[in-house]
Image (cartoon, grey):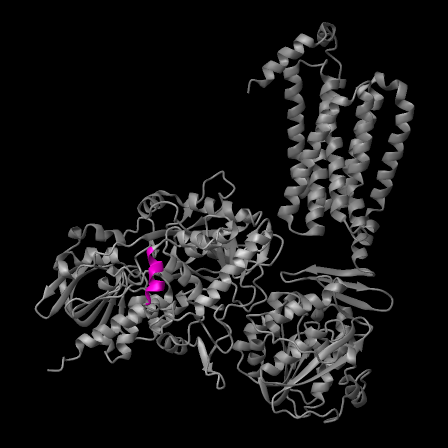
Amino acid sequence: MGSAGLLLAPLAGLHSCAPGSRRSHIRGSMHGANHATGHLLRDPARLPDPTRTEAVEVLIVGGGVAGLTARRELERQGLQPGQVLLVELDEQPGGNSRAGHNGVSAYPWGAHYLPVPDPRNHELLAFLRDAGVITGTDAASDLPIYNEYYLCHDLEERLFIKGHWQNGLVPELGVPPAEKEQIARFFALIEELRQTVGTDGRDAFVIPLEASSQDEQFRRLDEQPFAAWLDEQGFTSPHLRWYFDYSCRDDYGATAAQVSAWAGLHYFAARKGRAHNANGADVLTWPAGNGFLVEQLRRQAQSSIRPDTVAFALHQTPTGLAVDCYDVATKQTTRVTARQVLMATPLFITERLLAGLPAAAHRPLPVHRVPWVVVNLTVEGLPQGPGQPLSWDNVLYGTDSVGYVDAGHQSLSQTDAGARVVTWYRPLSDASPEAARRQAYQTSYDEWVRQALAELETAHHGLTAQVLRADVWVWGHGMVAPTPGFLWGGARAAAARPWQNQLFFAHTDLSGISIFEEGFAQGQRAAREVQAARRPTPA
Amino acid sequence: MDKVPVRRVRRKASGSPSAAAALPAAPLDYRPTLLLGSVFVIATCGLIYELIAGTLASYLLGDSVLQFSTIIGAYLFAMGIGSWLSRYLGGSLLRWFIQLEILVGLVGGFSAPLLFLLFEHVSSFRLILYSLVGLTGILVGLEIPLLMRILENRFEFKDLVSRVFTFDYIGALLASLVFPLVLVPQLGLIRTSLLCGALNVVVAGIALYRFPETRPFRRSLGGALAASLLALAVTFGYAGQLQAYTEGLAFQDQVIYTKTTPYQRLVLTKNQRELRLFLNGNLQFSSADEYRYHEALVHPAMQALPKARRVLVLGGGDGLAVRELLKYPQLEHIDLVDLDPGMTRLFQQNQMLLELNQRALLNPKVRVTNADAYQWIRQDTSRYDCIIVDFPDPGNYSIGKLYSAAFYRALEQRLAPGGWAVVQSTSPYVARRSFWCVAHTLEAAGFTTLPYHAYVPSFGEWGFILAGRNSHWRPDAGPLPPGLRYVTPATIRDMRFFPPDMSEVPTEINQLNNQALVRYFEEDWGPYAH
């Protein structure tokens, strides 16, 4: 393995597995836990006072999908690159769509696909066109044509159940007929809900969720847990219930008992993608996952992105707002004044930053944020069990994780049958988020690797010996879960409202669903609000 | 931890005082030491049988981790059964021991040659493998308990256990070192197996002739012993031929060359009539009729392009398509892109193969590039008058991408205006839907297609598709080179006719996100146990 040396090159900060164990040869990095830069915010008083000042028109705090989208949109609306500045706490932007790479492949650290979008989502389609993801429009149907290299190639999903890899993720193998009936009934109901329109003429469920119908008969579903609704509807099949838990954990990090029925149904009924060469069930994916989309967002605007920069305090000034930004590299603080500040940060960060502003500016919205752990395994090979060969998304029935994706899936090469990177995801949804986060921060590198391999060995005997490297990311604050009442209870909408034409908010915390489309929609909305505030009010 | 003292107490209580008293009476008796020495041999050979079975299983069945762990598991379990069974052995224990040793020598010794021979002939090879592993394991498992019972009155129990297991484990260490470092490289699996068998029989012989108690049955067992040793020795002598025979069994003819490259296993076989190349066990060509395949692949396209200067060949690392191309003197440049340097090097160096491809890959007009075809055509910027696409059949999802509409669209970027591409497209007779799926996929990518087929005896009916864009094709557009043995203007006209059993059927388009072709191919070839 010529690449082995290359893989081990960055020795600094490398963790290793327990000596004497079967995984003692495994090394790798660990990110996220006890995030030094992020935790500077816990005690901002210890950060130095500003030594210099800088003035911009619009300051964006946070370089996740929402912040990057707003940056792009502000330029499209006419702001000059010099008028906008984005500060990002991490060493690079991307948020939950961050990606990494090594000598074998690029790989995702979080979000890794985008379902083929609803063609009515014009803003998203325009971005995808600029990104080369949409290559044209079919003259006859007027539907977008997607770049075939980005549409997920065949052998998309498989499920390891009863010692066998079956096609697709809905359990089929060995499922009793009575359960199969329930499964069929559920999907028939979903098909119906997908077509259903509320009394206001809007779709019952749609992405982005803000465009969904306000009809009470649907919004009521937000008040009860998904699991309770499923009980009511007689969806009791253990296999089906596993599938619901898997789906909710995959998209929300929380189980069917923890999310609202509206959110549970939205997961299934809101994907309405149409394309000339794909349909709503198809997804777009890249080796780097949504790191590809983040890179495209970044490239489609010129204004500065300042990484390793901790915005830690906001103040009111006579002309707008001032934000103290600490540069981790130079250890100096700059006071950035701006006419508008867009907070594209998770709400628990936003709250800390707004401490110096009047109460009316605050966003007291409690958010259920689930921690995640992601393990990127670089393997020499992946010993296969019986059934469908290695696919893009590979899920093990009845396990704690939501499975793994193969970063090499879209490869066109014949030569990479061997070494590859697989990304294993596990939401820590069994305990309360706080307890899970505390526990996660105390868990060692070796223990995460042990847990991932113990699970994967059940389907890939002998995998441990083939691991060249394991890199771990503990996402302590993971992402928002749409718990009952969160989506349509009213507090969410209030929290997103701008303050005094100076302070704006964009983050998937404010959507309640952490998917690319929502982050994008948040950024677009906030950018429009900023622009509206900047226009002179007619007398 | 307290198990040993408990046992010792119990044994002392039940052991005969006379036997215990006999201990100091035989201080110079070397025979117990001899038996302990045999523990060492037994342990070494026992582990080697296990290693042989594991190696053979991973060699013949693949997935070494799985094979090794299941073989070790089955073997240890069988040893457990043997140990348990040992309680039922009574009477003359030494006689049992000698019989067992001969049996272990035969079963273990012949295990490797037997498995090699049977692999090609038995449908349930795994059953034979595990039966043999189980039998060897049971026999080996019987040995140590039996020996301990034989020795129990000659040593104090704590010394007996300590010595027997010491020799047992040292033997295991020796085996694990000697097997990979000395035996396999020097002797090969078959000879190693036979040698260990002989050692077991020798242990039986020493026991038989060194212990006076064996006198009553020396004659009968002695004969069996000698016969076994002879059989093992003779087989050992013929091991070379046996090895060649078993390798050759996978192929009908004599294997004259094998090489495992990072991408595939190349095997060349030869008989009086022909030379055959196999890639991963699949026949690539037979020298007896490959001219039919390669003439049919190259000339229908090339005769339509009398002004062609530049040609691209994708796949075809054997240089046989290039040999046909070089019959057109107007060609100035041929790019050959093949994944495997092991393949192209073989066809640039091996004398027999250089004769076959007429040194095509050494021609100054030819540039050989070892690269991944898909990536190469996306990076290349030049145009070619003719592109020959000669990939392996779409038998897996990775190769299936080389037959996708997306690939053909990328291919179209490399084709000069008015040029022709030709694609080998599996058998329209065996894999009718696969063949027409390739044609329809080329059409979906914007090509005009001209499907045709040729009969190649080694392969059967074989299909090709000409693909062009605004290109004009006639079966007699230009002169064919002299000396062709199969293709003439009349042959070309015939090749374009599809009888009803191969005629066009509706199919899906092969896209990267549906891989329709691989599914057709699996279903079409499935009944032929491809």
Tell me: residue B79, above or below residue A413. above
Q: Which residues are magenta?
A: A215-223
> Quick check: B131 left or right of B506?
right
Q: Quadrant of the N terminus of chain A?
A: bottom right
Specify the quadrant of the image occupied by residue A524: bottom left
Q: Position of residue A343 (x, y in %)?
A: 23, 64
Q: Quadrant of the C terminus of chain A?
A: bottom left
Q: Along the line of sight, which residue is nearer the eye, B393 or A278?
A: A278
Q: Position of residue A418 (x, y in %)?
A: 57, 58
Tell me: residue B225, above or below residue A433. above
Question: What's the residue at 27%, 77% (across, down)?
Answer: A75
Q: Along the line of sight, which residue is nearer the eye, A516 or B304?
A: A516
> Quick check: B34 left or right of A243?
right
Tell me: residue A399, above or below residue A419. above
Magenta region, main secondary structure: helix
Q: Position of residue B208 (x, y in %)?
A: 84, 23
Queried whether the magenta region covers residue B484, the answer comes back as no
Specify the quadrant of the image occupied by residue B520: bottom right
